[in-house]
Image (cartoon, grey):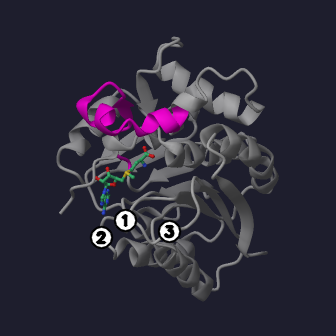
Amino acid sequence: MLSYRHSFHAGNHADVLKHIVQMLIIENLQLKEKGFYYLDTHSGVGRYRLFSEEAEKTAEYQEGIARLWDKEDLPEEVQRYVSLVKKLNYGGKELRYYAGSPFIAAQLLRPQDRALLTELHPADYPLLRNTFKEFTNISTKRDNGFQQLKATLPPKERRGLVLIDPPYELKEDYDLVVKAIEEGYKRFATGIYAIWYPVVLRQQTKRIIKGLENTGIRKILQIELAVRPDSEQRGMTASGMIVINPPWTLEEQMKKILPYLTRTLVPEGTGSWSVKWITPE
Ligand code: SAM
């Protein structure tokens, strides 16, 4: 049932967008001294070897992080993200490893911040646990990520980010995302929730948007980067992040960097981007 392995996709254009948004939200939470809670519901293994058999087979990172790696004109926000990935590569010239969302968070967390990383895959979970076993403020758990919103919210810190990044290999994930958000929001309405979504068939993406609109939750921002126009053919043409209660700076930051990202990640010229409110304040 769990056939999705993120190692095939690590560092692709969708990861670039997701991890930049994740970094910007965490940076914003850290403008205050008070600690916060970071919940990563679908963590993957935490970091990826790009010279592994899986990554080399698809080489999706070649059209993602690799296109930013040597650039000297990166916008400052993108530069900070690339620096985080460079840390994982021992600051080196060569791109050999890619940082998953748990690693991006782990690089940024301060001692007063706390994280819970959940992953369900029997082969991926032990890798995740091993990678983070030395971190005293990071716990890992082999469990269903969707259930963690009900189980662990509200956090004692009363501030936090929940990243929901399912594989969507099961169609029900589209509905489970909305259900999980409802559960979380009931308990922790001031939390920040960031949901990653692919655009494979636009109808399925609309299902999440409709579902969220129907919850009545306000302040939902949608950020999207397309590498090709929508299509009925197989394959992901775009991906996006839906952010509930985004930091007020996020909209402007993304509007500033998305033209650069689109140009650089999609040199073929078929790309496009958008930042819009699903429901405003
Ligand atoms: N968030 C990661 C990152 O950005 O580096 C990538 C996550 S990947 C897209 C999705 C992961 O969710 C896979 O590793 C998969 O094994 C895991 N998974 C699938 N269903 C799950 C569930 N119900 N609960 C927790 N993890 C699940």
Residue 164 within the segment the image draws in magenta: no
Q: Quadrant of residue 83?
A: top right
| Label 3 CB-ligand 1 distance < 8 A | no
Residue segment shown in magenta: 43-65
Callout 2–callout 1 Cβ contact below 8 Å: yes
Residue 61 within the segment the image draws in magenta: yes
Q: Amino acid at mark 2?
A: Leu
Give the number of the disc on residue 23. Answer: none
Residue at 73 percent across and 29 percent down: it is: 74
Residue 77 vertical placement versus 192 (above, below): above
Residue at 66 percent across and 37 percent down: it is: 264
Nearest to the observer: residue 111 or residue 272: 272
- Residue 44 shown left or right of residue 247 in the figure: left
Q: Which residue is mark 2?
A: 170
Which label's residue is closer to the chain start, 3 or 2? Answer: 2
Q: Secondary structure at mark 1?
A: loop
**Image location of residue 196, percent across then percent down:** 51, 59
* Mark-to-mark CA distance, 2 and 1: 5 Å
**Image location of residue 32, percent across then percent down:** 74, 43
Give the number of the disc on residue 231. Answer: 3
Q: Secondary structure at mark 2?
A: loop
Q: Is residue 186 visible?
A: yes
Q: Quadrant of residue 68?
A: top right
User: Which one is in front in this view, the residue at disc 3 or the one at disc 1?
Assistant: 3
Q: Is residue 103 visible?
A: no
Q: Which residue is mark 1?
A: 168
Q: Amino acid at mark 3?
A: Ser
